[in-house]
Amino acid sequence: MKKGISPLIAVVLLVGLAVSLAILLMNFFDVFSQDRIEDIDEDALKRDLCTDKTWIVLEGYCIQISAVKTDLHIGIENNGVYPIEEIFFRIVRVDDPSSTLSHTYSTRIQSYGIGAFTITDASTLPGDYNVILEKRLDYNGTILNCDPIESELELSSCRIGPP
């Protein structure tokens, strides 16, 4: 009779061990996959809002130089369906990368909206510049920082009066 009980206890112990191991692995992979799904959802949302639903167009940019000051005028359009909370500009002269001008445009630009700003006493001259734009969007109270966008910008003198 002792020989019959020993294999039965071994089978019960092995089955219990296998079930316990299976439960532990399922819990681990469930938590891991849930975190990964949330990361993928957040990345997809950021990509959707930053690239597909907001589109910045710079228009009417020029430099107005007078005897007393230099003004850099930039017009901004959001040709997307999602509002932009803030845009951080970094303007770098192509032939002199140490000559950098930074500005944060903190006025909300609605979908298909426009905005403009002027930087006074800008130490810029007409020429070729690279502009780096970083959009910040508000998604349900959370600020999303979009990846920087770099573009070339040729600044010329502003026209005064009608063309």
Image: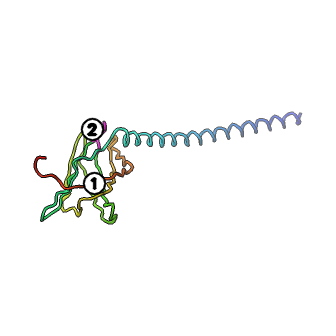
Horizontally, residue 85 falls left or right of residue 23, namely: left
Kind of residue indicated by mark 1 = Glu
Residue that appears at 20% across and 51% down: 117
**Quadrant assignment, res 46:** top left
Horizontally, residue 19 falls left or right of residue 91, namely: right
Whether residue 107 is in magenta: the answer is no
Nearest the eye: 122 or 40: 122
Kind of residue indicated by mark 2 = Ser
Q: Which residues are magenta?
A: 78-84
Tell me the chief SS of the magenta region. Answer: loop
Q: Is residue 96 above or below residue 151?
A: below
Q: CA distance from mark 2 to mark 1?
A: 26 Å
Disc assigned to residue 154: 1
* Residue lying furthest front: 163
Expressed as whole percent of the image width and height from the top left, the position of residue 95 reads 33, 63
Q: Is residue 62 above or below residue 44?
A: below
Residue that appears at 29% across and 50% down: 87
Disc 2: which residue: 111
| Closer mark to the observer between disc 2 and disc 1 | 1
Q: How many marks?
A: 2
